[in-house]
Amino acid sequence: MAAVGDSITAGDSIDLAGGVPGPQSWVSYAVGSEIEFVGGWAGWGANTAGMANAIAQPLDADVLVILAGTNDAGWTPHRQIGNNLSLIASTAGVDAVVLSSVPPNDLAPGNTEELNAYLERFAAHQDWVWVDAAAGLRDGDRYAEGMSYDGVHPTEQGARVRGEAIAPAVLDALGEE
């Protein structure tokens, strides 16, 4: 598995690109005996256009997990987000793609609900696997208690909830679940 994302994916990783996620990255909790993490790209503050520009070459993985759009919500038209997601997947060159929901944003409630509805439809249109990995983090349109330390980024517990939700989607994309 490879991953592309923003600070939600990067967390406190020292070398995510090299395959070493930190405990505040959901990636740490998606890997296990059936899923190996080979790296990818994630950057704090990255929007989907920035992610698309950052992926310069194919990634050597069987599944690509994209968690993107948090920094676009409320600013970037959904169609442009979709174009950027398509470019990320195309450049990464990984056939099986899992698209994850973005988490709540307590500073801009409501923006992520609309974006997630679009992302779910977009994933279906692309024949990608959709996972609402943020479901366990939410209480309405905000983070549930203990799931975020600042209303935007998940705590280690929140990262675990997200990673454990993404793992079955990765196996589904591989045809193993």
Image: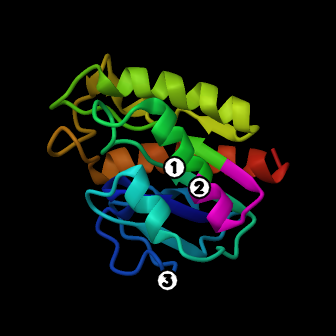
Relative to 93, residue 120 above or below = above
Start-end of magenta stretch? 87-97
Q: For the residue marked with disc 2, what is the amino acid? A: Leu
Residue at 35% x, 52% y is 47
Relative to 24, residue 16 above or below = below
Left or right placement of residue 58 versus residue 11 in this view: right
Residue with the mark numbered 1: 84
Q: Which mark is residue 68?
A: none
Q: Is residue 148 magenta?
A: no
Quarter of the image holding residue 129? top right
Q: What is the crowding at mark 3: few (fewer than 14 residues within 10 Å), some, or many (at least 20)?
A: few
Residue at 49% x, 60% y is 52
> Could you tell me if the residues under marks 3 and 2 are in contact, i.e. CB atoms within 8 Å?
no
In 3D space, how far apart are the residues under numbered discs 1 and 3 (Cα atoms)?
23 Å
Mark in front: 3 vs 2 = 2
Quadrant housing the C terminus: top right
Q: Which mark is residue 18?
A: 3
Residue with the mark numbered 2: 87
Quadrant housing the N terminus: bottom right
- Nearer-N-terminus badge (3/2): 3
Q: Front-most of 161 and 57?
A: 57
Q: Residue furthest top?
A: 140
Q: Front-most of 60 and 48?
A: 48
> Could you tell me if the residues under marks 1 and 3 are in contact, i.e. CB atoms within 8 Å?
no
Q: For the residue marked with disc 1, what is the amino acid? A: Asn
> Could you tell me if the residues under marks 1 and 2 are in contact, i.e. CB atoms within 8 Å?
yes
**Which x, y percent locates residue 39?**
54, 74
Mark in front: 1 vs 3 = 1
